[in-house]
Amino acid sequence: MDGTDQQHRPVALVTGAGRSAGIAASVVLTLARTGWDVGFTYWTPYDERMPWGADPDAVAQLSSQAAEHGARTAAIEVDLGDSRAVAGIFDAVERELGAVGALVLAHCESVSSGLLDTSIESFDRHFAVNTRANWLLIREYAQRFQGPHGTGRIVSLTSDATVGNLPYGASKGALDRITRAAAQELAHLGVTANAIDPGPTDTGWMTAEIKAAVLRSTPLGRLGRPQDCANLVAFLCSPDGGWINGQLLRSDGGIA
């Protein structure tokens, strides 16, 4: 790829790409392979407090792998629970790569607890990260978007897991509504907005018992892979995906 081609790559912003095994990392690489430059966020303290732990080499590896596809990247470490952080993310991506044409919301807070044992602090944290941050990211994207009508893309990753995972599921349900609202309210910009429910995806969080249960419940007889979701994200962000709008797409192998 020569310098002229490089200058004409569109720019995507992907949130939550802090682990090599995660869906967001696959999205970054798939978008890079299909012609995008990609800014991405990550937040190491979240991974450090989760059972899988931090992946200290993930960010550098992701940037290096994306470069193999001719993509420039910009990595931003940021706590999306901080409502003041959003403008700075876009400022950084615009400074390094250019204006954002596609926004992929793949970050999350996910700490399992149920109706009776969820703390107020955990509930508020889930809604700050999974709901409020996504609203603010969509709003900031819309306020800055100046691309040709019909080229803008918003894709959010959602979940229908709620029982035993109440704050996560409830905050993702709110994200679904925000995404669908964006499909209508951003019509003047020609921006599509869709949500993807990838179902149970093997990113390192499943116990042996959960894997066995998912395999029993999935008609295709395998676990979801990060690449499965990334393929759909890339399609929705492409010109071929431009007629799909305001949808909740269950890309889950039929488990739902």
Image (tube, rainbow, N blue to C red):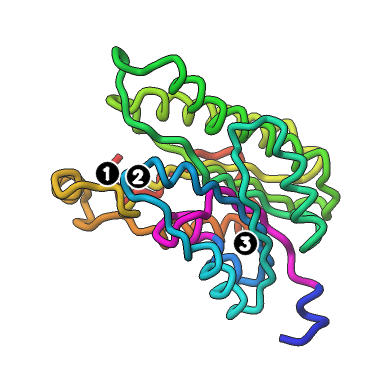
Q: Distance between the residues labelled 2 and 1?
A: 7 Å
Judge from the rendering whether residue 174 lies leftward or rightward of residue 110; answer left or right: right
Which contiguous range is marked in magenta? 8-27
In the depicted structure, whether residue 27 falls above or below residue 77 = below
Can residue 33 be seen in the rendering of this structure? Answer: no
Magenta stretch contains residue 39: no
Residues at discs 2 and 1 in contact (Cβ within 8 Å): yes
> Which residue is more in the foreground, 55 or 16?
55
Residue sitting at 66 percent across and 37 percent down?
Answer: 183
Numbered badge on residue 240: 3
Residue sitting at 55 percent across and 43 percent down?
Answer: 156
Q: Earlier in the sequence, mark 2 or mark 1?
A: 2
Q: Earlier in the sequence, mark 3 or mark 2?
A: 2
Q: How crowded is mark 3: few (under 14 residues within 10 Å), some or many (20 or more)?
A: few
In the rendered image, residue 239, in percent from the top left (x then y), is placed at: 67, 61
Q: Nearer the viewer, mark 3 or mark 1?
A: 1
